[in-house]
Amino acid sequence: MENKVRNGLLICALLVFAVLIAGCSDQSSAGTTTTVPTTALPVAKFAAGDIIAKSASSTDQSLYVITQYDAKSGMYTRAWIYKNADGSWGHFIDNKTEKVERTLVEKVYPVAIRRVTISSIPIVTPTIPPTVVATLSGSAPTVTGISPASGVKDAVVAATITGTNFENGATAKLSRAGYPPFTATGVSVSSSTSISCNFRLSSADEGSYNVMVTNPGGQSDTLMGAFSVGQAPPILTGVSPYMAEIGDTQKLITINGQNFKEGVKVTFVQGTSEINCGTPTFIDTTKISCLLNVRILDGAKSGLWDVKVLNIDGQQTGILTGKFTVNNATVTST
């Protein structure tokens, strides 16, 4: 009986010892710190001096060059590098640099096409070539007039330009702001003061134009608003009857011609004297008529008078010179 008790106590002691050992083992395990390995940043693809491009076949005259890489921040420092005149790389034009994330640089510019030594790359400031001012030779012309001073749309006008210092080889133009110029053809410099030429006014808009003459040496002059393009002026070819007598009864006058418009004024002119032919009637573009009250001829000089027609809309004038006769009285032969 005593042996059984002794054996039971021994077993209990062993169990307690085992439990104590297990507890110590757990505590030791709990106190152990597990080290987690860190992931190192990938090695940079480029180094200082690498000229980077989008492709190995790049033909650009300027590219980025890596000047530095900071592994801690993962940032490249880059600058623009330029080709020299002989096609070699290179030079800087200033000392500007910029920092860009490594991943972005390597994604956009995946290729290094050349490597240079950054410290040996010079800064070359580009020079701006001086503006070359053309030297004009010869004397400057002056334009004082043009005859005729007007023309009709789509017509060819033979004109004479007057002025000074015109030289052989001079050119002439009609210009107007916002419109293409009309360049003269058949230009002939007959003297230093006169130029003969033709202006073809194809599709010309009505209005005033400037007259410009340029000498071969580049010197030029412009007479502003000296020439006008408008509607065709009236052209008079005949008048009937062609004679009236002072004190005679009123006469119906018919005038033949071209380019007559509705709204005209007809007058008879001798020197500074001018007589109206009352209330003209427009028949068509080639004929008009008016009623001449010969009593208004009292006091007028006898002799030849001009017939003048004015198209009021546009103020174009046509004249038939010396084709209307005014007599003092009827001459009776004996």
Image: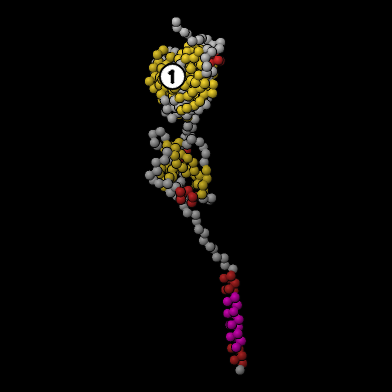
In the displayed orientation, state which residue is furthest to the bottom: 1
Q: Which of 17 and 234 is in front in this view?
A: 234
Q: Nearer the viewer, residue 112 or 126?
A: 126
In the displayed orientation, state which residue is furthest to the top: 334
The N terminus sits in image quarter: bottom right
Disc 1 is placed on an element classified as strand
Q: Where is residue 200 in the image (x, y as percent from the top left)?
A: 41, 25
Q: Examine the rendered structure and indicate whether residue 278 appears above or below residue 245.
A: below
Q: Name the residue under label 1.
A: 238
Residue occupying image coordinates x 54% and y 63%: 35
11 is within the stretch colored magenta: yes
Residue occupying image coordinates x 41% and y 24%: 156
The C terminus sits in image quarter: top left
Q: Where is residue 208 in the image (x, y as percent from the top left)?
A: 50, 24
Q: What residue type is labelled 1?
A: Gly
Residue 14 can be seen in this image: yes
The part of the chain drawn in magenta is: 8-23
Q: Nearer the viewer, residue 44 or 56?
A: 56
Residue occupying image coordinates x 47% and y 8%: 331
Residue 182 can be seen in this image: no
Q: Residue 200 vs residue 223: left or right? A: left
Residue occupying image coordinates x 52% and y 43%: 98
Q: Position of residue 161 (x, y in %)?
A: 45, 17
